[in-house]
Image (cartoon, rainbow, N blue to C red):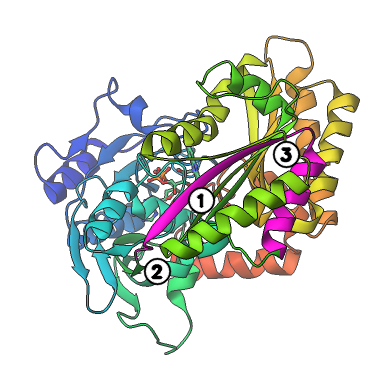
Amino acid sequence: MISGDILKELSDIVGQGHLIADQDRLPEFGSDGTKLTAMPDAVVFPGTSREVSRILELATREQFPVIPRGAGSGMSGGAVPVKGGVVMAMNRFDRILEIDRENFIARVEPGVITAHLQERVEKSGLFYPPDPASAHISTIGGNVAECAGGLRAVKYGVTRDYVLGLTVVLPTGQILKTGVETMKGVAGYDLTRLIVGSEGTLAVITAITLRLVPKPEAQKTMLAFFPDVSSALRAASGVISERIVPTALEFMDRRSIECVRQEIDLSIPDEAGSMLLMEIDGDRDLVERETKKIGSVCRRHRALSFQEASDKHDTERFWEARRNISPSLYRLRPHKVSEDIVVPRSRMDELVSYLGKIERDYGLPIPAFGHAGDGNLHVNIMYDRERKGESEQAQLIVQVLFRKVIEMGGTITGEHGIGITKAPYLRMEISRAGIELMARIKKAFDPRGILNPGKIFPT
Ligand SMILES: Cc1cc2nc3c(=O)[nH]c(=O)nc-3n(C[C@H](O)[C@H](O)[C@H](O)COP(=O)(O)OP(=O)(O)OC[C@H]3O[C@@H](n4cnc5c(N)ncnc54)[C@H](O)[C@@H]3O)c2cc1C
């Protein structure tokens, strides 16, 4: 519990109106996309790096937890204040500082909503490719802290591939610049890469320098339905074998299709057992040629239907199917455990077959969808807390699934991070020596353990 004196000091640092300690308003800052909840003691809204620094100095001196928070859309509980303390909400850091068209660079504050940055950059004729499905709600700071992936990762990579440099505040209060503002730079250890994906446990990010690329001239979205998973995944491999790298190559299994079918306006063949949603970009001629090739690859692999979006409206309708999957799955059961495992692309079919086996063995529905282009599958274990034994079954499935994924040469999280939900399983993937080294790095940044405690490390 934080004392009245400390609350007063915090309020003096951030100024009037930028601190919440009212019990009625705190719950809205205690949860994230996982819906897991814990109550903070207070929420502060700093407006400058200097204020962040003074808050962290105070926290280190008085030993209370500080939990950085973007939009709270995280899917592993990273922003949940599991040990209480002060949530540091970054909403006031909401400026796009500069779009440098000559050097293809954007300088932004962390509280900027990802989609707002994308729009501004595109107005300048440039492109910021990382595109998490949550782009309209998540912040760029949260994306950097989680190393968000997203729909275009198959062609363009993930957030880390675009972060050139950061301004950060260490838990001790030191303000530090990492990285470069140029396209190249190798001076010293790569602290930027270390902080990207560190889930708010090493430093608070207060400014970000991002690399941009030219905006592609044209793009095309396509949708194909197949009778079964194997045909769709073979078609996905077939597209890549043609040396076409789509910007998006999204997959949906039969159960996901059945759920989403009831919610959207799209013609879906009755026998559809899987779906591919594909997008390509580039210059106009290339996009046209590749669209034709993709159509013939899909038909060669028994596509039941193949549709090209002819305008923005079609594109939106196709993407609506993808966006609606996640909420529509609650038709199966009221609760879900949502995992984002990755396996080598060539072994996705094997993994999807394995999911069928564990569905039969454990008796819970496990719809899967996700990024077929990079082997990143969102596996959803649906259960009902009120039904006897289902919560326990769901937890058992997670273990069995993770074991299989690691055995296949994959990872337990492609983009959502470890946070609290996967902390108990980190040892399955990272060796003891690896975790000990990470713990020493954490200690070097945060000697008193005040920044986002209870995350990543297994207890
Ligand atoms: C519908 C939906 C779709 C999604 N799709 C994707 C997807 O396609 N790809 C993907 O990768 N993720 C996806 N996510 C997950 C989530 O949106 C991302 O992890 C996103 O990056 C979180 O951003 P945020 O601003 O909401 O961060 P928060 O949830 O607020 O915080 C996430 C983590 O970042 C830390 N943090 C936040 N800001 C800072 C800062 N300034 N300095 C230091 N640490 C900070 C927090 O402490 C926490 O550990 C999805 C989530 C939802 C709800």
Q: In the rendered view, tell whether residue 290 sits above or below residue 372.
A: below
Looking at the rendered image, the disc whose residue lies closer to the viewer, 2 or 1, is 1
Instruction: Tell me the magenta residue range.
Output: 215-241
Q: Residue at x 64, y 26 (%)?
A: 336
| Mark 2 and mark 1: Cα distance apart in space | 15 Å
Tell whether 155 sits left or right of 40.
right
| Mark 3 and mark 1: Cα distance apart in space | 25 Å
Residue matched to label 1: 150
Residue 227 drawn in magenta: yes
Residue 429 drawn in magenta: no
Query: Mark 1 or mark 3, which is nearer the start of the sequence?
Result: 1
Q: Residue at x 40, y 32 (%)?
A: 30
Residue type, mark 2 in image: Val
Residue matched to label 3: 303
Q: Residue furthest left?
A: 16
Residue 292 in view of the camera = yes
